[in-house]
Image (tube, rainbow, N blue to C red):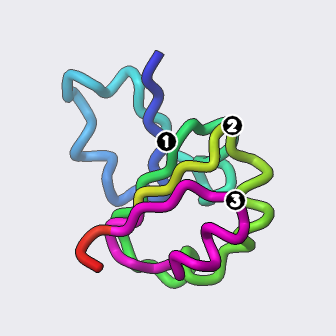
Amino acid sequence: MVKICIVGTGYVGLVTGACFAEVVEFCNSAYAAASGADALILCTEWDEFHKLDLEKLRSVMAQPIVLDGRNVFDPKKMAALGFVYKSVGR
């Protein structure tokens, strides 16, 4: 089953009535969105993501896979913490 967790409410209008609206959940934190996740896709440079406790993030994920579309994280640090990490445009 596909489940998409989005942090922030600015996207509500984008998914209301969309064909995938039934699989979207809005979360109040990155940790809540990542809880039990097989992968995390980062598409924003919001300050809160720069300040994440990456060990905590790793511990709540089912699989430590991160696709970083904004190059927020250091690839060497992510690898050292056990993440499968891919950044876009580096």
Callout 2 touching callout 1 (CB < 8 Å):
no
What is the C-alpha distance between the residues marked 2 and 1? 14 Å
Q: Earlier in the sequence, mark 3 or mark 1?
A: 1
Which label is found at residue 5?
A: 1
Q: What is the crowding at mark 2: few (fewer than 14 residues within 10 Å), some, or many (at least 20)?
A: few
Q: Amino acid at mark 2?
A: Ala
Secondary structure of the residue carrying tag 2 is loop
| Vertical arrangement, residue 70 with respect to residue 67, above or below | below
- Residue at (37%, 71%) from the top-left corner? 44
Q: Quadrant of residue 55?
A: bottom right
- Residue at (51%, 43%) from the top-left corner? 39
Q: What is the crowding at mark 3: few (fewer than 14 residues within 10 Å), some, or many (at least 20)?
A: few
65 left or right of 24 in image? right
In this view of the protein, which residue sits in the foreground, 61 or 33? 61
* Residue for badge 3: 82
80 left or right of 19 in image? right
What is the C-alpha distance between the residues marked 3 and 2? 12 Å
Farthest residue to the top: give it: 1
Magenta extent: 68-87
15 left or right of 36 in image? left
